[in-house]
Image (cartoon, coloured by chain):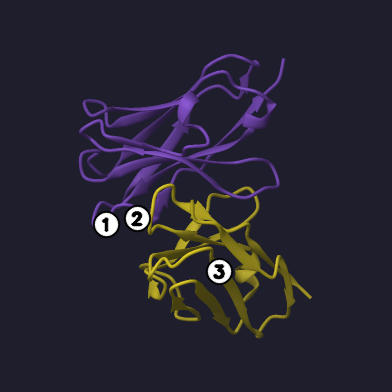
Amino acid sequence: QVQLQESGPELAKPSETLTLTCSVSGDSIISHYWTWLRQPPGKGLEWIGNVYYTGSTNYNPSLKSRVSILIDTSNNQFSLKLRSVTAADTAVYYCARQLNDYNPNRFDTWGRGTLVTVSS
Amino acid sequence: DIHMTQSPSILSASVGDRVTLTCRASQSIGSWLAWYQQKPGKAPKALIYRASALETGVPSTFSGSGSGTEFTLTISGLQPDDFATYYCQQYHTYPVSFGQGTKVEIK
């Protein structure tokens, strides 16, 4: 059974770079696309971007200037770097699997999510 | 970018009711639409893909329909476990996008 687990800091300071990691078990990371999404408290879902095992990425234009998504095939992990964070980046961050039969695609498996608060 | 709009924002219903949620796309997305269920404090759970196909393990009380710009999610016979927030997502074009959600609450 595929499982995804987010890890990283619960608190970030304004202007810092936030780095989160998603560990994948039960599936090979070279099989699909891997995605980051977020959900501000009490609000809806926002797609951040995804990465393929080749390193190819797609980003939401609204965040593209501040986002990098990287993949580590040797450790079956992928990561999110979000630069120059502000309070508006406070959210639950989810990693998810995007099946590769179509591109783009829906997200069939999600991590539990990790709440990141941006505050000084 | 494609904008997704869901209605209503809140739907009050009783156990056993048949309810229909609507999702509209700002431009045609064919059948490239998914539905998710989210409960408080939990990650979204995939329910339906390609507008009408059930994900594995999803009960047949859930059904989806539509194409182009208008889509519906129907729950026939609401169960206590079905009270949640439901999101639609288009995956026709990057950036993929979600509706703002419909909360199904107990009347």
Of residues A109 and A118, the one drawn nearer to the viewer in this rendering = A118
Query: Badge 3: how crowded within 10 Å, few (<14), some, or many (20+)?
Result: many
Q: Are marks 2 and 1 in contact (CB under 8 Å)?
A: yes
Residue B54 % position (x, y): 39, 72
Q: Which residue is mark 3?
A: B24
Which chain is rendered yellow in the image?
Answer: B
Q: Residue at x 20, y 33 (%)?
A: A54
Which chain is rendered purple in the image?
Answer: A
A80 relative to A37, above or below: above
Query: Badge 1: how crowded within 10 Å, few (<14), some, or many (20+)?
Result: few
Q: What element does badge 3 sit on?
A: strand
Q: What element does badge 2 sit on?
A: loop
Residue B23 % position (x, y): 56, 69
Left or right, residue A15 beside residue A102? right
Q: Which residue is mark 1?
A: A102
Report how far apart the C-alphas of labels 3 and 2 lie in the structure.
18 Å
Report how far apart the C-alphas of labels 2 and 1 lie in the structure.
6 Å
Q: Which residue is mark 2?
A: A105
Q: Amino acid at mark 2?
A: Asn
Residue A103 % position (x, y): 29, 52
